[in-house]
Image (tube, rainbow, N blue to C red):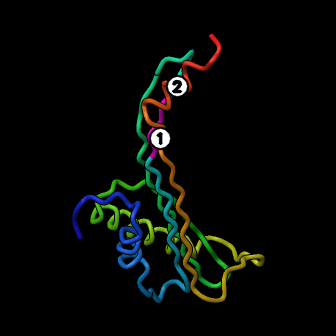
């Protein structure tokens, strides 16, 4: 497990899940939620470009359950699969130990079977010509 990943492709999430969601006799259920974003921003003020920036961020939420006890933690990821797996495995160990310290949650509800979902949203930046036309039409 090595290499830098963007986590924007399903295969990258699957690599994390394969490493982290192995059966563990200390927990009844574990889950992994990944939230990744890669965005480019252009900010204009009075028709002039004031800021151009990119955002690349990835957060993973690891949760473990035993009986009616559940705990979770979120970490930002680096994109280095081996390093991220080590950090999440260490976090899972801490979470598992915390299960003994928390009370049962009588309202805990969970799916009867394993679930998997994915949502992806994408967009495109306007071309330079389109942006220029829009800016020249703005009142000054």
Q: Residue 124 placed where, x, y %?
A: 48, 46
- Residue positioned most to the left: 2
Q: Residue at x 55, y 18 (%)?
A: 136
Please give the name of the residue rendered at 34% of the width and 62% of the height, measured from the top-left corner.
Answer: 84
Q: Residues within 10 Å of mark 1 (few under 14, many from 20)?
A: few
Residue 82 falls left or right of residue 18: left
Marks 2 and 1 sit apart, C-alpha to C-alpha, by: 14 Å
x 49%, y 63%: residue? 34
Where residue 39 appears, as percent x and y from the top left, is 46, 44
User: Do the CB atoms of the residues marked 2 and 1 lie less than 8 Å apart?
Assistant: no
- Which label's residue is closer to the chain start, 2 or 1? 1
Viewer-closest of 135 and 27? 135
The quadrant where residue 109 appears: bottom right
**Furthest-top residue in this view:** 140
Say which of 91 and 114 sits in front.
114
**Image quarter of the C terminus:** top right
Magenta segment, prevailing SS (helix, strand or loop)? strand
State which mark lies toward you, 2 or 1: 2
Q: Quadrant of the N terminus?
A: bottom left
Task: Give left or right: position of 73 versus 20.
Answer: right
Disc 2: CA contacts within 10 A as few (<14), some (14-19) or many (>=20): few
Residue range (magenta): 39-43
Residue that badge 1 annotates: 125
Q: Is residue 86 magenta?
A: no
Which residue is identified by label 2? Answer: 133
The residue that appears at 54% across and 75% down in the rendered structure is: 64
């Amino acid at each position: 497990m090595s290499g830098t990943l963007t986590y924007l492709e399903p295969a990258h999430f699957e690599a994390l899940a394969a490493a982290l969601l192995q059966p563990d006799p200390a927990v009844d259920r574990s889950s992994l939620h990944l939230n990744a974003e890669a965005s480019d921003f252009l900010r204009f003020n009075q028709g002039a470009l004031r800021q151009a920036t990119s955002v690349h961020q990835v957060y993973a939420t690891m949760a473990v359950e035993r009986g009616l006890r559940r705990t979770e933690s979120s970490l930002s990821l680096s994109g280095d699969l081996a390093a991220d797996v080590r950090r999440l495995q260490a976090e899972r160990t801490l979470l598992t130990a915390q299960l003994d310290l928390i009370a049962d949650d009588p309202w805990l509800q969970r799916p009867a079977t394993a679930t998997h979902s994915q949502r992806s949203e994408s967009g495109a930046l306007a071309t330079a010509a389109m942006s220029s036309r829009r800016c020249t039409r703005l009142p000054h």
